[in-house]
Amino acid sequence: MNNIVRRLRIKKNMSQEELATQANTTRQTIIRIGKGEKPSFDVAMNISKVFDKAVNEIFLTAQ
């Protein structure tokens, strides 16, 4: 999960701050997601909209 968000962010040439602003969250939240913490539903939805991807494409991983 964390690598997916980071890869998408880098692919769009976005800083953590830019992603946080567009996803209506904080840079600290983006950092925590990057370290493997699961985001709230609202943050996950906002990030998926920023990247124009389904939530499950970004945040659901095989168990």
Image (cartoon, rainbow, N blue to C red):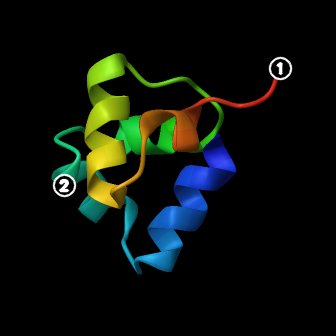
* CA neighbours of label 1 inside 10 A, class few (<14), some (14 to 19), many (20+): few
Q: Quadrant of the C terminus?
A: top right
Q: Give the image location of residue 59, x and y in percent.
A: 56, 34
Which quarter of the figure has residue 26? top left
Of the two numbered discs 1 and 2 on the same chain, state the one appearing first in sequence: 2
Q: Position of residue 19 (x, y in %)?
A: 30, 57
Q: Nearer the viewer, residue 25 or 46?
A: 46
Classify residue 7 by image quadrant: bottom right
In the displayed structure, 40 sits above or below 17; it is above
> CB of mark 1 within 8 Å of CB of mark 2?
no
Q: Please state which of residues 58 and 6 is positioned toward the viewer in this rendering.
A: 58
Q: CA distance from mark 1 to mark 2?
A: 29 Å
Q: Which residue is mark 1?
A: 63
Assign a secondary structure to mark 1: loop
- Residue ID at (65%, 32%): 36
Which residue: 16% across, 41% down?
24
The kind of residue tagged 1 is Gln
Give the residue type that dot 2 points to. Answer: Gln
Please state if 35 lies on the left or on the right of 14 as rendered. right
State the residue at coordinates (56%, 43%). Answer: 57
